[in-house]
Image (spheres, rainbow, N blue to C red):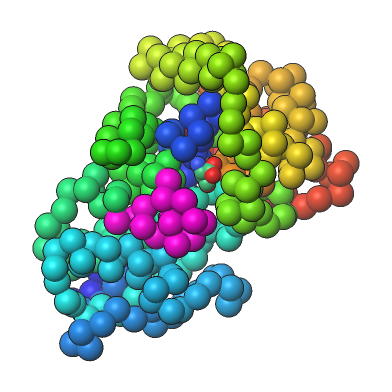
Amino acid sequence: KQVTAFAPATVANVSCGFDILGFAIDELGDWVQVTQSDSGILRVVEIQGDGGKLPLEPEKNTCSVAIQAMLDEMGLRQGLDIHLFKGLPLGSGMGSSAASAAAALVAANEILGNPFEKKDLVPFAMEAERIACGAAHADNVAPSIMGGFVLIRGYDPLDVVKLPVPEGLYCTLVHPHLELKTADSRSVLRQQISLKESTVQSGNIAGLIAGLFQSDFELISRSLKDVIAEPSRALLIPGFYELRESIRSVGALGSGISGSGPTIFILSQGKEIALQAGEASKEVFKKIGLGVDVYVSEV
Ligand code: HSE
C-alpha cells in the first residue's frame, strides 16, 4: 500500500500569539509519499527539493520522527519507506519542518486505516518539532494538519482549538532570501517579560481572536502587535520596519514575522490590497538589494 499526502505552509505566532496561534497557507507546502514495506523499520529513502540539506537518518528526519511517535503510541512495529518532496524553503519561517511531519503523519495514518483523528496527530508532529528546533511547539504543526486558524489554548495537557476565518482575509508572504534557523531565532528571545508587556500582549491576542470571530477587520488590524518576540527578532530581518511602513499606505491590516522568520506575513482584507502589499514589499527589498519571493493566498 502507498499513500501520498500534502501538508501546507503555516504562519505561526501571528504577531501576538507567540507559540499559541497559527494559520495554514494552502497553496504552498510539502508532499510525502509513504509506502508499506516488510523491512520492519522506518526508512527515509529519498528527499527532493532540499538541496541535500536534510538528514536521511530516521532519528533526525522530521517525517520519520513524527511517524515513529505515532507507531510508539500504537505499540506497533511497521516497515514504512518515506519519500519527501519539499515544496517549502528551509529556515524560512513558513513551517517547513512542520509541513514535512504533518504530511508524513497524514499519509502513514491513512496506510494504517486512519486510527487517529487529524487533531490527534498533532502531538506526534510536535515530537518532530522538538528534533528540528529543540522546542516542541504546536503552532505550525496544528494548522498544517488541521487547516485554517488554530489556537493552542494549552500545552499541558494539549488543548487545540480551531478558529473561524473571516471571508476575504488574505495573506501576503514575503520571503527574503535569507535562512534563519528556528533554534537561533529562539535563542535571541528574552526569558522574562514585564507585567505591563503581559497585559499588552494579552489584550492583543484576545482582540485578534475576537476579530476573527466577528469578522471585524479593524479589530484584527489593531491587534496585530507583538511586544514579546518581535522586538528581538526584527533585528535579524533587514527591511522589517520599512516594509511595515510601506504596506500601511496600501491599506493592509498589518504585518509581522511569520514564525521565527525571516518571512514576513501581511494580512489584508481582499485580494487587491494583498497584491499591492506584495508589490510594495518588493520595492522595499529592491532598495535594500535583497532578493524576495512573494506569495499571495486567501487564508
Ligand atoms: N512559535 C515558534 C517560534 C514558531 O516563534 O519560535 C517557529 O516557526
Residue 192 % position (x, y)? 59, 31
Residue name at image x 12 percent, y 57 percent: 115
Residue 218 % position (x, y)? 54, 11
Let me know if residue 119 is in the magenta part.
no
Residue 272, placed above or below residue 293: above
Q: Quadrant of the C terminus?
A: top left
Residue with the most extreme bottom position: 39
Residue name at image x 69 percent, y 31 percent: 231
Residue 216, placed above or below residue 65: above
Dividing the picture into quadrants, the one containing residue 267 is top right
Q: Is residue 117 visible?
A: yes
Residue 173 % position (x, y)? 60, 41
Let me know if residue 133 is in the magenta part.
yes
> In this rendering, would 294 be left or right of 206?
right
Instruction: Please state which of residues 188 and 149 is positioned toward the viewer in this rendering.
Output: 188
Instruction: Please state which of residues 152 and 26 is positioned toward the viewer in this rendering.
Output: 152
> In this rendering, would 208 be left or right of 110?
right
Residue name at image x 74 percent, y 43 percent: 237
> In this rendering, would 209 be left or right of 200?
left
Q: Is residue 208 visible?
A: no
Determine the main secondary structure of the stretch shown in magenta.
helix
Magenta extent = 124-137
Residue 199 % position (x, y)? 53, 14
Residue 195, placed above or below residue 160: above
Q: Quadrant of the N terminus?
A: bottom left
